[in-house]
């Protein structure tokens, strides 16, 4: 692959329910990322994003990483790992403290964020990310950079992503068993957004629907920040299962039929186009079976109708549905289904486009589709290292804790005010 000299190397592993993929990228002097090597293996020991067999998962991770290392011509010791399992939760907390009217300085922001860090109560959950979403000055929403402004009160809306601790630890254990250090475990909605959303889209407001094999994750972005996440516990693999069940075929046959003949959109010709299945000698079949393309699309559409109802409901809970005209971007393997963008645009009532990895060089064609947005986003997250208050430290003796207040606010209210 690329032979460009690089300053730093980042490696990522995305552990999904259908595939486990690895990517090694180098950062050039100008900050751009160049892909050095990629690897992919069929997912083993993973069900709906959760590790169900550590040994099987560890072997798949090891093989994917070794393949990427051979292509890149280098070895790696540490990786950034994606976590896409259902159960991701999103909360917004508001912190304020008094300034007495003086100009905001960097130390005021640092103190505010460290107070926020100390005040987070995960209630038994694991904190995956805790990032400032929106600053406020005397109650004014949406201040991007308060430094230099006079204020009586400085506030921040802190977006916190939570997950059940055991599944995250199991992912870390599987990767560690492959003799790899884990730099960070990153929620895939965050990674995918960095990879396939433009800077302007993230600033204006956009919803990302990441259709994985077994989990669909939604995320809402505004003013360049991730401000809401919602998980739906089914995905494109459920369409495959429906096809297999409806026509009595194996999953691998159903996946091929879905990919080559399936669509989210129907046409008059579908009743005349036929699809032939290989006869299964193990079941004593003597003749191949045939169905019409219309029958296949009917099964696909039934599942999609169910999924879009759940997606619409989630968008309403995230405060996005009544923002007419705002863009929805589809990523994940489910976004590769023929006609899915037009179908979703009609079902959701928003303009829809397919999201593919952006702003990386030398990405192989096989890894340039929406199914690999999270993988590319992981190395971008590693290179950009976005601010996370969990990394801040605070000397309690120098704080003005008595003047600071912190409270959780309903996500709906924060988003409604921000939009």
Image: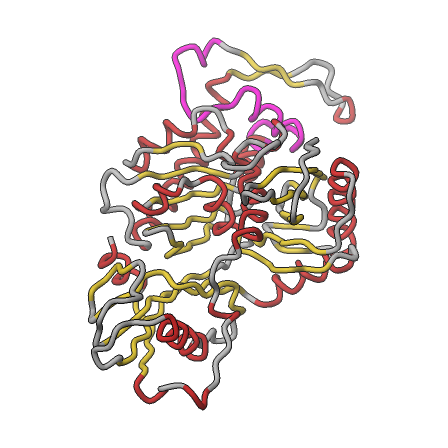
Res 197 quadrant in image: top left
The answer to whether residue 364 is seen in the rendering is yes
**In the foreground, 136 or 130:** 136
Kindly identify the residue that appears in the image at 56 percent across and 54 percent down: 85
**In the foreground, 34 or 87:** 34
**In the foreground, 103 or 67:** 103
Kindly identify the residue that appears in the image at 50 percent across and 17 percent down: 293
Q: Which residues are magenta?
A: 244-272
Q: Is residue 246 within the magenta segment? A: yes
Kindly identify the residue that appears in the image at 28 percent across and 53 percent down: 319
Q: Give residue 185's position: percent from left, percent from top.
A: 59, 58
Q: Is residue 234 within the magenta segment? A: no
Res 22 quadrant in image: top right
Q: Is residue 163 above or below residue 196?
A: below
Classified by dominant secondary structure, the portion drawn in magenta counts as helix
Q: How is the image coloured?
A: secondary structure
Q: How many marks?
A: 0
Q: Give residue 378's position: percent from left, percent from top.
A: 57, 49
Left or right position of 69 against 190:
right
């Amino acid at each position: 692959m690329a032979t460009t000299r690089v300053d730093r190397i980042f490696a990522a592993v995305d552990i999904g329910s259908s595939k486990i993929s690895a990517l090694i990228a180098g950062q050039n002097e100008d900050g751009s990322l160049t892909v050095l090597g990629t690897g992919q293996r069929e997912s083993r020991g993973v069900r709906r994003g959760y590790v169900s067999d550590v040994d099987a998962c560890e072997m798949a991770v090891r093989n994917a990483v070794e393949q990427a290392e051979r292509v890149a011509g280098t070895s790696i010791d540490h990786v950034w790992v994606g976590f896409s399992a259902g159960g991701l939760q999103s909360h917004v907390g508001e912190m304020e403290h008094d300034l007495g009217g003086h100009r905001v300085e960097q130390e005021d922001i640092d103190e505010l964020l460290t107070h926020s860090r100390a005040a987070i109560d995960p209630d038994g959950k694991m904190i995956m990310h805790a990032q400032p979403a929106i600053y406020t000055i005397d109650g004014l929403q949406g201040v991007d950079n308060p430094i230099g402004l006079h204020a009586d009160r400085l506030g921040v809306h802190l977006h916190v992503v939570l997950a059940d601790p055991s599944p995250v630890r199991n992912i870390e254990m599987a990767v560690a068993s492959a003799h790899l250090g884990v730099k960070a475990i990153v929620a895939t909605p965050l990674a995918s957004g960095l990879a396939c959303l433009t800077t302007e889209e993230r600033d204006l407001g956009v919803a990302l629907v990441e259709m994985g094999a077994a989990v669909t994750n939604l995320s809402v972005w505004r003013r360049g920040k991730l401000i809401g996440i919602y998980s739906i516990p089914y995905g494109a693999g459920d369409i495959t299962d429906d096809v297999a069940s409806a026509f009595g075929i194996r999953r691998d046959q159903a996946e091929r039929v879905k990919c080559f003949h399936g669509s989210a959109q129907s046409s008059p010709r579908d009743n005349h186009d036929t699809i032939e299945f290989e006869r299964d000698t193990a079941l004593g079949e003597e003749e191949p079976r045939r169905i019409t393309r219309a029958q296949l699309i009917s099964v696909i559409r039934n599942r999609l109708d169910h999924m879009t109802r759940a997606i619409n409901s989630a968008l309403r809970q995230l405060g996005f549905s009544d923002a007419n005209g705002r863009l929805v971007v589809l990523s994940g393997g489910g976004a590769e289904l023929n006609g899915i963008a037009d179908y979703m645009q009609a079902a959701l009532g928003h303009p829809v486009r397919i999201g593919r990895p952006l702003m990386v060089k030398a990405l192989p064609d096989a890894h340039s589709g929406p199914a690999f947005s999270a993988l590319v986003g992981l190395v971008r997250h590693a290179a950009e290292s976005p601010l996370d208050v969990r990394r801040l430290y605070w000397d309690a003796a120098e704080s003005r804790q008595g003047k600071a207040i912190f409270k959780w606010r309903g996500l709906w209210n924060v988003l409604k005010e921000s939009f």
